[in-house]
Structure formats: structure tokens, C-alpha cells
Image (cartoon, grey):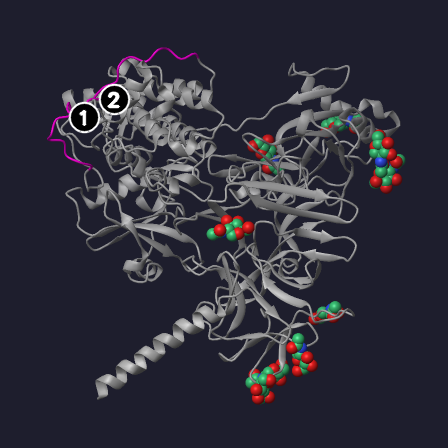
Amino acid sequence: MIDRNIIIELIILLFLSSHSRTCIARDTLSLNQSIVDGQTLVSSNGTFELGFFTPGNSKARYLGMWYKNLTPLTIVWVANRETPLSKNSGVLKLNENGVLVILNDTNNSIWSSNTTTKEAKNSITAQLLDTGNLVLKNGEENILWQSFDYPCDTLLPGMKLGWNLVTGLNRFESSWKSEDNPAKGDYSVSIDIRGYPQIVLKEGSVIRLRIGSWNGLGFTGYPTQPLKQTQKFEFVQTDKEVYHRYEVVDSSVVSIYKLSPSGKLRALAWTSETSDRIVIETGMEDSCDSYAMCGANSVCSMNGNVPKCECLKGYVPKFPDQWNISYWSNGCVSKNKSNCDNSYKDGFLKYNDIKLPDTSSSWYNKSMSLVECQRGCMKNCSCKAYANVDIRNGGSGCLLWFDDLVDMRMFSQWGQDLYIRVPSSDLDDVSVSGKGNKKKHIIQITFGVTISGFLTCACIIILIKRVEPRIYNLGQLFQLRQKYFKLKKEDSDLPIFDFPMIVKATSNFCSRNKLGEGGFGPVYKGTLIDGKEVAIKRNSKMSDQGLQEFKNEVLLIAKLQHRNLVKLLGCCIHKEENLLIYEYMPNRSLDYFIFDESRSKLLTWSHRSCIIDGIARGLLYLHQDSRLRIIHRDLKSSNILLDGQMNPKISDFGLARTFGGDQVEAKTRKLVGTYGYMPPEYVVHGRYSMKSDVFSFGVIVLEIISGNKITGFYDPEHSLNLVGHAWRLWIEHIPLELVDAQLLQTIRSSEILRYIHVGLLCVQEKPEDRPDMSSAILMLNGEKILSQPKSPGFYTGKDLPEAISPSSNQMSVTIFEAR
Ligand SMILES: *[C@@H]1O[C@H](CO)[C@@H](O)[C@H](O)[C@H]1NC(C)=O
Ligand SMILES: *[C@@H]1O[C@H](CO)[C@@H](O)[C@H](O)[C@H]1NC(C)=O
Ligand SMILES: *[C@@H]1O[C@H](CO)[C@@H](O)[C@H](O)[C@H]1NC(C)=O
Ligand SMILES: *[C@@H]1O[C@H](CO)[C@@H](O)[C@H](O)[C@H]1NC(C)=O
Ligand SMILES: *[C@@H]1O[C@H](CO)[C@@H](O)[C@H](O)[C@H]1NC(C)=O
Ligand SMILES: *[C@@H]1O[C@H](CO)[C@@H](O)[C@H](O)[C@H]1NC(C)=O
Ligand SMILES: *[C@@H]1O[C@H](CO)[C@@H](O)[C@H](O)[C@H]1NC(C)=O
Ligand SMILES: *[C@@H]1O[C@H](CO)[C@@H](O)[C@H](O)[C@H]1NC(C)=O
Ligand SMILES: *[C@@H]1O[C@H](CO)[C@@H](O)[C@H](O)[C@H]1NC(C)=O
């Protein structure tokens, strides 16, 4: 009997639940209709859902909108962000006056769309559209209210960010107070319409970051726009409106911009087939992006990971003694007052690849030419600089600055040209250097970002020169350095982290925080007390390497600094455990993207070529520019991590070796490395050199282009591995068949062809035939003629010896050196 009752009850419950589900799957409310907590509106094609939810650890209920089939729950809009409901009793109703209201359990309105209309109300409806816009309309045309006009922390495709100048409506993104509280937080992203419009991220009323002004192609502070291939940016400026909007070009890749409670503007992108997402920090790539990092009239540039400020020509530090200790925020002042009575004596100096200064006090005219612009600036004594408004078609329009020039930075590419006014006395200074054109007083100076070795590295090279050439491992090198400089461990600037702090950061190495298994041990994600996200590598079993050596090694690796090498933040030694703390890479590693059918869609050709270029630069730094001459020896796609901008970072230096003096090659009897990425001379004779890394680099290039794994790939007809397959297609003159199908729409086939060509040159059988990294970079840039590649090493899958030990699990492996 009991059983039967339960069954009947179950059937009724099932019926009810399925019944109510079909009942509420609608997208529209008509007059007097409502939904209660638990019911939702769903847009017609099922993309968005609107209903009541509870954020994070809060207990309050809010009416919000989210992507229906996306995990984790991604809230894109909240109605009653300032007036939460305390119980699950909220009702969303289109009331008899045609106003959308949220009622609490005493039938009081706690939020309303706050609209009035004098027209007949019977045909007013509220509809959730497939774009994520909740619209209140009277008939089809007459929109009374829409959620797109009241953004919260998320910018969706098609949403306008900016101003309706007629009504004064300002649509801006504002952060949540915290993950648990959607109320308006401290941060906002908006369009500043003083002067020429620009997008700014503010904390309260203070600007923290400028995405900058529109130049026809993009925003001056955000030239890379990593999602360029899948999004189209638009900027509209008329008498009635000023707004920015973006559309998704490839509808299989969805992307949104979210402003986090801590003020980070991030693009999230995912494909329709999977909810794995890439996270891209927008606009904030390095310290130079912080607003007015260098104060007024000075330009920020990155030197490795370190920002550096330089006064504009004709300006000097306001407080030289502060400036000398890298305290830059007071900026620079002009050295000589420009001589206005004799204004033709002033000239202009062109800076390339610049983020244009703050335009809030600028003046502009979109129809003036650059020549008129210069004349205009020359005429007015207080004009400090000029530039084109629009850089398309050779440039047009005129932007003038009359105040201090604030928040400029140098980009390595894609920046804009800025012409600054300089008194003739200072121009003469420059012309001495031979580049000036005295007649017109327009002189061009081009800045490039230089990567220089660090002082310590420079010291070490001196050290190496003094002793006989031999191979050092990093630990020995550090010991030598210690002896030479009588350094104590404590003198090192690598922070030592407290173990309890790490335990706290990872919630006691909770499996939820595990990111994966590295060559060294498990890797965990951690959040430090200040909110900084880190990756923590844990090695609980002490290797046969001594503790001291571990420390030393770590201390040395900490000195390697380059934007394409992963940055070590610190270490921690606790009983039997060695822990390394690295910067956290939100986009994991290269293999995670290129070998996955749907995730690889997110990696367009421009991403992939940038990634290849970045790996090449990182490797060049290791081989040459760091002056230490380091061979990585375990380069593979899973060791290439991707940061918030999808920049590649070489990681895992566990097997790295240092060469001293004129050493070019070494020999070992113990093979370490990873199957498929090791060159023949190493596998067969145990010989390794810089050219071993070049071989591995070539394999990675082919993997990135083809989307296939070197180890997983198999050509059924010819029993070839990926390298062999690429080589066969090359000699059969059909190399483009190697290219990942995802990239086929790309029009840059000649560029892809060049990359394949370079890849094949790098995997040639004889090390001496392979280019070194500096030539490889020139070749990738198309600045060096490419020779015909000879046949590669190891291409018939079969010719690899069986007994190759895979990548070792130790931090470093002792090898038997034959000298
Ligand atoms: C809505 O409700 C009001 C008051 O309850 C009633 O006067 C009106 O006729 C209703 N309208 C519709 C379209 O049902
Ligand atoms: C709120 O309104 C609903 C529907 O009009 C009614 O059934 C309910 O009794 C009202 N509750 C209160 C507390 O007034
Ligand atoms: C409902 O909202 C009204 C107006 O904001 C408020 O005075 C009342 O206390 C609320 N009722 C409950 C149960 O929260
Ligand atoms: C909407 O509400 C705000 C305050 O919440 C008020 O200032 C504004 O006048 C209202 N607008 C309309 C159209 O009622
Ligand atoms: C739903 O409609 C939106 C907007 O038209 C479109 O971008 C999206 O691809 C559609 N989604 C599905 C699953 O059809
Ligand atoms: C600042 O440093 C430069 C060179 O390093 C030096 O010439 C100058 O005298 C210093 N100025 C002050 C105020 O310390
Ligand atoms: C400009 O400054 C330099 C050095 O600061 C000085 O020698 C020169 O006389 C000044 N020129 C004018 C026109 O003031
Ligand atoms: C902008 O420049 C053009 C060409 O020099 C000129 O005809 C026009 O009047 C200018 N407009 C404004 C608003 O100054
Ligand atoms: C120079 O420009 C400023 C700012 O637009 C203006 O206030 C000033 O009157 C101008 N001076 C001359 C001489 O045109």
C-alpha cells in the first residue's frame, strides 16, 4: 500500500514538474501577467533566461538574467541590484499601468521599470529577446524601456556603451560590490565625452585605466584586441549619440565583457559546443597601462617586466631626485617656455607606436588634414601636441592637446603617431643626431622596445668568462655567484612564502583547486590574501637533489625575466616539500587549446602567429639575450602557458641546462625530454645544443598550424608522424593541406605558408642546417630569405627507439656529462 502511494505521488510530482516546465517556457509577459520565484522567462531560441537567483554565498534573492545553458552560472544583468528580496517570494509583474514591477511578499513594489505612457496600455508587453535584452514595448515598434539601457557589470554583443545626447542617458558598466552582492560597486567603465570621447575605467571618480579614444580601427589603448577575429568593434559619434558597441562575427564563439568587483575588465569567450572559457584581461596588460603611471608629459615603456618612464623631448623631471629613484608620478615639466613671438621656431617631434594621451581636454575636428592640424597647433601657443583622429587610409582629422599630456605609453607595435611641440633649441639637439630635417623642423624618432639582460646576468657572464668553459647546472652557477659576491641566501629578492599562507591560499590543497599535473608534481590554483591569483607547484617527495640546490636553482630562475617566460613569484620549503609559486595563467596551456576541436576555434590565425612569435622571442632570450645561454630541453606545447591576453609563456625549467663560455654543444648518456620533441642527434648520440630547442620549436610550430599532436598523429598510408606528414605535403607541393581546418577561412595563406616553411627548416635532420632562433625570428617576420628545407629528422613514426624515458618528474635530472 505504502509503496503504491509513493509511486502515485511520484507520478503526480513528475507530471506537475514537467507540466510546469512546459507552462513557463515563454519569453513574454502581457498586461497583468507575472512570474513568481522559481519560474523563468526564456528567450525564443533558448539563449537567455530571466528569473530569480541568489548570488554566491548571499541569501538574498535578485531578479537577473543569465545564459541558459552555460555553467558556471553567468549573470549578465540584475534588475533589483540595490533592493534585494529577503525571501523566495518575489513576483515579477507587468502591472495594469504597463509598468514592470517586482513585488515582495506584502505586494509592495521594490523595483520598477519606472515608465509612464499616455497611450492605450492593452498592447504593452515585456519580452526577453535572444540578444539578452528585456524590452517593454507598446506594439512592435514603440519601445518604452529596455534592460540594454541599464547595463550592470556586463557588456553583451549589440549593447550600447555610451550616451544618448538628446535624453542625457548614459549607459555604463558598473561592477558588483562583491561576488555575493550585485549592488553598484566602486568600478565603472564608461565613455568620457569631455574633449574627444574615450573609454575609461574608473574607481569612484578617479580614472584607473584608459581604453582610450577611437581611431577608426580600434581604441588607442587596446590595439591588440585579442578577439579581433570573432568580434567587430563599432564606435558611433553623431549629434545625438556617442556609443561603442560590438558584434560577434562568428556566432559559434560567444564573448562578453565583464567588470569584476575588483575592477578588472575581462573578456570571456566560449564556443557554443563547450563551456570552457578563455579569459582575457582587457586593456590592462602591464604596469604601463595604469593611468598616468608616469605622470604628465612622460612616456611609459616596458623593459622586460619592468616599467620605465621617460620625459618627452623638451621636458625635464619635475622633481629630479624623485625621478632618480623611479618615483615618477609627478611627471615632467617643459624645459624652456616656447617662444611664442617667434613661433615658427617651434617644431614638432613625431613619436611612433604611442598610446595617445588623455583626450579629456583635447580639441578635435574630423575634417582637417594633418598639415592643417600642424598649422592649427603651431598658431596657438598653448597647443602641446597633435595627432590624427582617424588612422585609416593614411590618416585624417585633427586632435589637439592644450594641457599637460597625460597617460602615454609605448607599444611594441600598432600604436599611433603623436607629434609633440618642441622649442627650436631642443630640436637642434635632436638634429645633431643626424635624423633631423632642419627646414621643416619635423624630426622623427622611432622607439623600439629593447630587451636587455639583467644586471645579475651580466655579472654572471663575466664570471663565466673567467673560468674554463664547461657546463654548469643552474645550482652550481648560483653557488659560484654566491662565492664571487659573498652573497647570502637572504640577499636574494625572491620572496619566501609561509607554508600556512599557501595552505590557506589553496584551501589546504583542495582538489577543487587542482589545475593539473606538471613535470614536477601537482599544480594548484591559489588566491593570496591580497586577492592575487597564483599557481602553486607542489613536490612533496624530496628528489635526490639536495635542498640547497633546489633553492639555488629556484633563485636563479627567478632572475630570468621576459614577457614570454613564466614568472616565478616565490618559493616555499616546508619539511619534505618544495613549493614553487608562479603567476597564474588563466588560459592554461597551448595544448589545451590547439588539440581540442571546439576550443581550437577560439585560436584564430592571428592568435596562433602571435603565439609562435612569442615562443620564438622567449626562446631567443633564453639562448642569447639573457646572456646565460640556457637550453630548455623540454619544450613542448604543454609547457607553453597562455596568459590573460593569450600571450605564450615558456614554463617548466626543470630540465634546463646552462652553457658557459663558447660552449655550443654537450653530450649526455641519460636522455630526458619528451618523445617526439627530441631531435635525432640527441636521441641517437646524446648530443644537445641550442639547435635541440630549435627542433622542438619547429615541432610546436607544426602542431600549432595543423592542430595535431606530434605524438598522436599518424598518417595511415605512409606511417608518418606529424613532421613526416608535413614534409610529404611539402614535397608534393600541397603544404597548405597541413593547415587546421579551423583556419581555412583565413586569407593570409602566404603567411601561413611562410610559417610552415620555417617550421620545416627548424626540424631538419642535421642540427647545423637548422636556423638559430634569431634567424628563425627574422624568417617568421619575412625579413630573411628562406632556403629550401632538407628532409627532417624522425619522420616515419617507426624510427624512434622504444626506450626513451618520458619527461622526468623531477625538478632537474642529473646527467652524466662527457667532456
Ligand atoms: C488588468 O487588471 C486590471 C485591474 O485588475 C483590469 O482592470 C484590467 O482589465 C486588466 N487588463 C487585462 C488586459 O487583463
Ligand atoms: C498580494 O496580491 C495577490 C494577488 O493580487 C493576492 O492574492 C495576495 O493576497 C496579496 N497579498 C497581500 C499580503 O496583500
Ligand atoms: C516589502 O517592501 C516594502 C517597501 O519597500 C517594505 O516596506 C516591506 O517591509 C517589504 N516587506 C517585506 C516582507 O520585506
Ligand atoms: C525613475 O526613477 C528615478 C529615481 O529612481 C527618478 O529620478 C526618475 O524621475 C524616474 N523616471 C520616471 C520616468 O519616472
Ligand atoms: C539565438 O539568437 C541569437 C540572436 O539572434 C543568436 O546570436 C544565437 O546564435 C541564437 N542561438 C541559437 C542557439 O540559435
Ligand atoms: C639623477 O641621475 C642622473 C644620472 O643617473 C644624474 O646625472 C643626476 O645628477 C641625478 N640627479 C639627482 C637630482 O640626483
Ligand atoms: C633652453 O634650456 C637650455 C638648457 O636648459 C638653455 O641652455 C637654453 O638657453 C634655453 N633656451 C631658451 C630659449 O630659453
Ligand atoms: C573643421 O575643419 C574644416 C576644414 O579645415 C573647416 O571647414 C570646418 O569649419 C572646421 N570645423 C570646425 C567645427 O571647426
Ligand atoms: C589657444 O587655445 C586655447 C584652448 O582652446 C584657447 O583658450 C585660446 O584662446 C587659444 N589662443 C589663441 C591665441 O588662439
Magenta residues, start to end: 785-807
Q: Give the residue type that dot 1 points to.
A: Gly
Where is residue 169? Give x, y as percent.
73, 58
Where is residue 696? Give x, y as percent.
29, 27
Secondary structure at numbered mark 2: helix
Quadrant holding ligand 2? bottom right
Q: Quadrant of residue 687?
A: top left
Residue sitting nearer the eye, 608 or 331: 608
Q: Are there few (<14), some (14-19), or many (20+) residues within 10 Å of tag 2?
A: many
Q: Is residue 640 left or right of residue 714?
A: right
Q: Give the residue type that dot 2 points to.
A: Gly
Question: Quick one: label 1 or label 2, which is nearer the N terminus?
Answer: 2
Q: Is residue 303 left or right of residue 293?
A: left
Q: Are marks 1 and 2 in contact (CB under 8 Å)?
A: yes
Q: Quadrant of residue 460?
A: top left
Instruction: In the rendered structure, find residue 724 and report the number of the disc placed on it.
Output: 2
**Extreme residue in the right direction:** 341
Where is residue 298? Give x, y as percent.
64, 37
Q: CA distance from mark 1 to mark 2?
A: 8 Å
Q: Is residue 85 visible?
A: yes
**Extreme residue in the bottom direction:** 1
On the image, numbered disc 1 is attached to which residue?
797
